[in-house]
């Protein structure tokens, strides 16, 4: 038989912690010293080492940076690298990337879809097709569910 008790010592879980109104997203540390070597990327583009330039841009995504100007600058550099690719070289370039870089590439592609221009739409769609062929649908799901934006 159970005893009637007014004791609340058995409650060890703070249920208010799980209230949706109290939810706090992951705290992002803002990196004020974020920088990508733009001159190195431009140099690699001029000597037609596009794969290396793409890897540099993909290795340093500005996900923890809150400054919109930095994100725009890196995104424009990303589009500059993609626009230099010939359509016949896209598949080879995408196949040379590992899964983490494919996810970042897909993040940039979807970022480009948000405010696409006539020139960038065709390039982004071409890369999107090749990334899905290599990375599968999981790549899209990981990007759409990730809260960290580029």
Image (tube, rainbow, N blue to C red):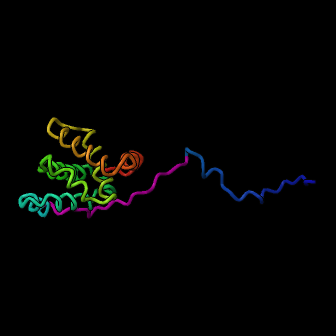
Which residue is at a point 11% across and 61% down the rendered structure image?
A: 44
Q: Magenta: predominant secondary structure element?
A: loop
Quadrant position of residue 114:
top left
Position of the N terminus, as image quadrant, is bottom right
Is 26 or 8 nearer to us in this picture?
26
Q: Nearer the viewer, residue 141 or 2?
A: 141
In the image, farthest residue toward the right: 1
What residue is drawn where x is 34% and y is 59%?
30
Q: Is residue 41 left or right of residue 133?
A: left
| Span of residues in magenta | 22-38
Residue pushed farthest top?
Answer: 118
- Residue 126 x %, y %: 21, 43
Q: Pinpoint residue 128: horizontal percent, then vertical percent.
A: 26, 44
- Counting every numbered tag in the picture gives 0
Foreground: 67 or 2?
2
Q: Is residue 117 magenta?
A: no
Whether residue 97 sits left or right of residue 148 in the image: it is left
Q: Is residue 26 left or right of residue 37?
A: right
Magenta run includes residue 30: yes
Residue 60 coordinates in the image, percent (x, y):
26, 61
Q: Position of residue 109 (x, y in %)?
A: 26, 45
């Amino acid at each position: 038989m159970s005893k009637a008790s007014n004791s609340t010592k058995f409650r060890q879980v703070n249920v208010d912690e799980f209230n949706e109104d109290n939810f706090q997203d992951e705290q992002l540390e803002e990196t004020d010293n974020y920088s990508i070597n733009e001159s190195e990327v431009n140099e690699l583009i001029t000597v037609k080492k596009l794969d290396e330039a793409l890897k540099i841009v993909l290795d340093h995504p500005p996900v923890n940076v809150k400054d919109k100007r930095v994100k725009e600058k890196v995104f424009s550099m990303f589009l500059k690298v993609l626009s230099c690719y010939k359509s016949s070289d896209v598949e080879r370039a995408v196949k040379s990337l590992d899964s983490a870089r494919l996810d970042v590439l897909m993040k940039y592609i979807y970022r480009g879809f948000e405010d696409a221009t006539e020139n960038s739409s065709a390039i982004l769609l071409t890369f999107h097709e090749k990334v899905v062929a290599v990375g599968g649908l999981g790549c899209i799901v990981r990007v759409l569910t990730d809260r960290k934006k580029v």
